[in-house]
Image: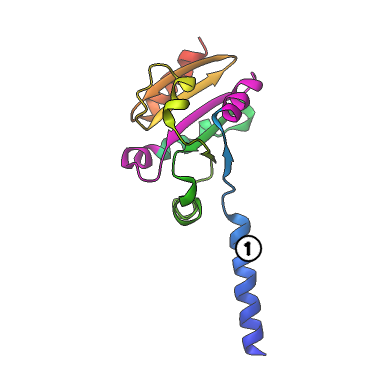
Amino acid sequence: MKRICTLLLIVGLCAFNSLKAQNVEEITIKQLLSRVNENTDTLYVVNFWATWCPPCVEELPIFAAPELNDSDRNVKVLLVSLDFKSQKEKQLLPFLEKKKIQQEVILLDERNPNDWIEQIEESWSGAIPATVVYHQNKKVFHEGEMTLPQLHELIRSINQ
């Protein structure tokens, strides 16, 4: 009986933990662009990053700033992972759980960066991290690491 209770407890904890796990949708660049351009009331902060990119990981906490995750202000943060699709279960999901990432994470389902980078920004070299702010059919782009004050400035610049 003790073994059955222990087993049920373990199964219950595993089920509870899986409910808390981040749901990472795999989308194409076309789907991403459609999403950020369909709702002009929402300001989208879209960060391109990867778990294998130290500067990307280092800047992730700025996207958790309370003022960026305030649904009353219609600001939506999207963290677009450029990790390999084959590493989703082994690397990406455990990383998100370990770092307690609460923002929405999307896994970009594209093979060749040369096919989609210019759709995001013509001047983008392809280096990450890179951040784009979309609002009311406008966009501003920043390539490289960013601080929270720089992100605030990027957001202010699109609202002018």
> What residue is shown at x 61% (from left), y 20% (from top)?
37
Whether the magenta-drawn stretch holds residue 58 is answered as yes
- Neighbours of disc 1 within 10 Å: few (<14), some (14-19), many (20+): few
Q: Give the range drawn in magenta.
A: 30-59
Percent x, y of residue 151: 42, 25
Q: In the image, 150: left or right of 1?
A: left
| Amino acid type for the residue under numbered disc 1 | Phe
Q: Tag count in the figure? A: 1
- Residue found at the far bottom of this picture: 1
Percent x, y of residue 160: 50, 9
Q: Which of 111 and 120 is in front in this view?
A: 111
Q: In the image, 21: left or right of 125?
A: right
Q: Which of 119 and 139 is in front in this view?
A: 119
Which of the 4 quarters of the picture holds residue 53?
A: top left
Which of the 4 quarters of the picture holds residue 128?
A: top left
Disc 1 designates what residue? 16
Percent x, y of residue 67: 52, 31
Percent x, y of residue 32: 57, 29
Is 150 located above or below residue 50 in the figure?
above
In the rendered image, is residue 3 in sight?
yes
Whether the magenta-drawn stretch holds residue 57 is answered as yes
In the rendered image, is residue 100 in sight?
no
- Colour scheme of this structure image? rainbow
> What residue is shown at x 46% (from left), y 17% (from top)?
140
Q: In the image, 32: left or right of 149?
A: right
> What residue is shown at x 65% (from left), y 21% (from top)?
38
Tell me the SS state at disc 1: helix
> What residue is shown at x 45% (from left), y 45% (from top)?
84
Q: Which of 85 and 133 is in front in this view?
A: 85
Is 37 located above or below residue 55 in the figure?
above
